[in-house]
Structures are given as C-alpha cells and as structure tokens.
Amino acid sequence: DTGVSQDPRHKITKRGQNVTFRCDPISEHNRLYWYRQTLGQGPEFLTYFQNEAQLEKSRLLSDRFSAERPKGSFSTLEIQRTEQGDSAMYLCASSPQMDSYGYTFGSGTRLTVV
Amino acid sequence: KNEVEQSPQNLTAQEGEFITINCSYSVGISALHWLQQHPGGGIVSLFMLSSGKKKHGRLIATINIQEKHSSLHITASHPRDSAVYICALSYNTDKLIFGTGTRLQVFP
C-alpha cells in the first residue's frame, strides 16, 4: 500500500459540466476526509466518512456537491453544474479509527473550471 | 477572528539558520498538527501534538496548552526545507481546521 491515491491529478472542465473525483485511502484506515484548498489559503473541511457512513458535511458542501464511500473503501466526490468558483485543489486524507498516527494525505486533484 | 493564526505568513532564511514558526489558537482542541506542503499540493504530516514537545530529525514541535500556542522549529535549515508549513487543529471528530500557512524559503 503506497498511501492515499487520488485520481485524476488534474481536471479542466467547462462551466456547467459535472466532474467526479476518486480517492483510495490506506486500506486499514476507517476515516476518510475531503478538503478543498484555494490559492494562498489553507485547506477547508468539506466532509468526512467513518467506514461507509458520512458523519459530517460542511456548509461549504452545497447541493451541487455529493460524496460517497460505498463499502467503506474508496470515496468519490462529485460536483454537478460546475462553476468557476469551484476551481481549487481537492484533497483527500485518511486516518485510523484512533488517530494516534495522524493523517495521510493524497496528492490532491486540481480542478480548473473554464 | 480565525480559530487558528500562524505567524509569520512568509519567511526567508539563509541556509543553516534556525527557524521558528508560530501558531496560536483560540479554542479547545484534542490535538494540534504541523503539516508540510510542497508546490504541487502534496501534504505531509510532520507532527501531531497534544502536549509537550516532539522531535524528528532537524524538526522540533512544542505546544503550550495553557497558552494555546505551538511552535515549529527547524534547526540547520536547508533549501529542501522550502515549503508551506501549516498548523491545524483537530477536535472530537478529528476533522482538521487549518491555518493559512507559513511560506518558507531557504536560500543557499
């Protein structure tokens, strides 16, 4: 296991299109998090899962955003009807049930909406 | 007011200098994290602290729970240390609340 994988690394899409990102966490990690980072800012929390259950969603996660983690393994983040303001780096992280060992982050998916 | 504040925002150093980055926060936390982010986006977890001090190689992190303050020190800095260093807080749910980061550039 080489860590947290995110796909794609880069995505350019036209405004109004739908996009979907995938995150594969470390296999033994129960918790999976999505964050969004815009240029010059720290990441902001979007949502998190414990196994397959989505336990918390940020107010940043509008109706156009949906996240799933079927079977408690990989997760997908979908953005419908993309807007230019959605352009950002989308980061995924995972951690064990007890976070004594902290977080492991993926390399992120950079979304550009044109 | 942000829950977590970092200083300085930008830091320039000559190779070999001792570097300190500060983080202050205003809420109760379960842990404080120091993270490193290189250009291109990848984030590496450096430390997770709930008390005291931790050391890993040339990096030292300290936290004072009573004063709600943490510092990250880099001894004998090197150009490869150039990155953005981010302080983040975790609560009961363990989601992270991030600071805006300190951009460090170390010149040879």
Image (cartoon, coloured by chain):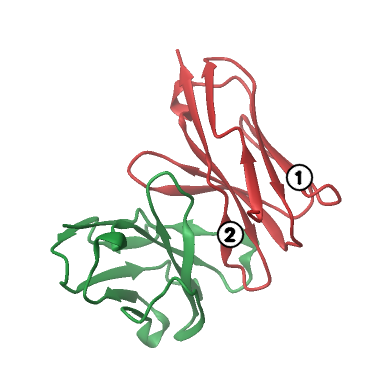
Chain colours: A green, B red
Marked residue chain, label 2: B
How many C-alpha atoms fall within 10 Å of the one at disc 2: few (<14), some, or many (≥20)? many
Callout 2 amino acid: Ile
Residue occupying image coordinates x 60% and y 16%: B17
Which residue bears the numbered disc 2? B97
Callout 1 amino acid: His
Which sits in the foreground, B100 or A8?
B100
Disc 2 from disc 1: Cα separation: 15 Å
Which residue bears the numbered disc 1? B69
Residue B100, placed above or below residue A59: above
**Quadrant holding the C terminus of chain B:** top left
The location of residue B14, given as percent across then percent down, is 53, 14
Residue occupying image coordinates x 79% and y 51%: B51
Residue B90, placed above or below residue B100: below
Horizontal relation, residue B28 to residue B9: left or right: right
Horizontal relation, residue B105 to residue B53: left or right: left
Which sits in the foreground, A71 or A44?
A44
Residue occupying image coordinates x 53% and y 42%: B101
